[in-house]
Amino acid sequence: MDKNAKVYIAGHRGMVGSAIKRRLEQARFTNFVTRTSSELDLRNQAAVNAFFEEEKPNYVFLAAAKVGGILANNTYRGEFIYDNLMIQNNVMHAAHINGVDKLMFLGSSCIYPKMAPQPMTEDSLLTGVLEPTNEPYAVAKIAGIKLADAYRSQYGSDFISVMPTNLYGPNDNYDLQKSHVLPALMRKFIEAKRDNKTHVMMWGTGSPKREFLHVDDLADACYYLMQTYSDAGLVNIGTGEDLAIIELAELIKKTVGFEGEIMLDTTKPDGTPRKLMNVDKLEKLGWTAKISLEKGVQMVYDDVKDIVWEG
């Protein structure tokens, strides 16, 4: 990547986009073009086309998406499939039409079948039924991978796809109705300690296993792959290690210093039993994660421990 080139990060204020921007700034990139969602609606094809024609970015990181946890995915099913399809279709097509040098599409580990063999390899894609609670989001992301591959095949567009595992870190969402499990638990334990509560209630049985990657590690992997990888298909980005949600809760409880007990609301859904990435392909390409979960959780706690959330 030419450090003087123009870089467009779609979703630059989100957790992933802001981390990628920080990583590029560390590498001395300075020529960024940005638009907030209020300035540019990526669901609007004409607006996206006009933006690309005006700005002519060299590199694009497509990190913009409508995202959320189990409740949000299952509740806003129409929005999750429509918004994400429109965003990625418009950005990729405009990138192709305007001759972008390279584009990276960021998906999600939920693209893999609910009962995919663990750890999940890239060739597990489209081999089984998806987890019903986030199927619309997953279908959109699968379409994005196939769109990138199709434009590579037909037009020679240098579009690559990466699939991050569960992410956490700066600029995460702590809305309990829409957040993912790690930030939701972090908020619950911080508030429980502050309010001297006797327990924290968490969703489900605590038995599903999940893998967690600090978003700064993801950004480092994305920067590395934009420089070194150019092929069809996709690359998993993760740690290759997972733990039960109840173990995550215990880690956060210890980090926060909460002394009450953990209670389980087993009327709430668990979601997929296990989602662990096989990262052999990524490691063979020369990259491995650096931030341990213990260190990453401590970093997050240090960042947010003094925040007072509304609602």
Image (tube, helix red, strand yellow):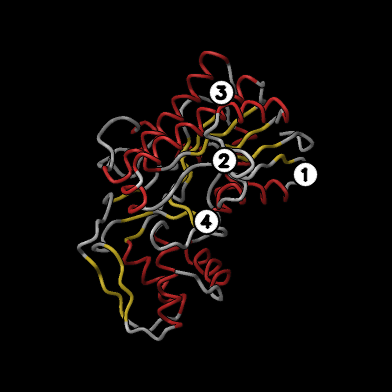
Q: Which residue is at the far top?
A: 154
The residues bearing labels 1 and 3 have C-alpha atoms spaced at a distance of 25 Å
The crowd level at tag 3 (other Cα within 10 Å; few <14, some 14-19, many 20+) is some
Residue annotated with mark 2? 286
The crowd level at tag 1 (other Cα within 10 Å; few <14, some 14-19, many 20+) is some
Q: Which mark is residue 214?
A: 4
Tag 3's secondary structure?
Answer: helix
Quadrant (top left, top right, bottom left, bottom right) of the C terminus: bottom left
Q: Is residue 234 above or below residue 245?
A: above
Mark 4 or mark 1, earlier in chain? 1
Q: How many marks?
A: 4
Q: Which mark is residue 93?
A: 3
Label 4 sits on what residue type? Answer: His
Q: Is residue 55 above or below residue 118?
A: above
The residues bearing labels 2 and 3 have C-alpha atoms spaced at a distance of 30 Å
Circle 1 or circle 2, nearest the eye: 1
Residue annotated with mark 1? 30
The crowd level at tag 2 (other Cα within 10 Å; few <14, some 14-19, many 20+) is few
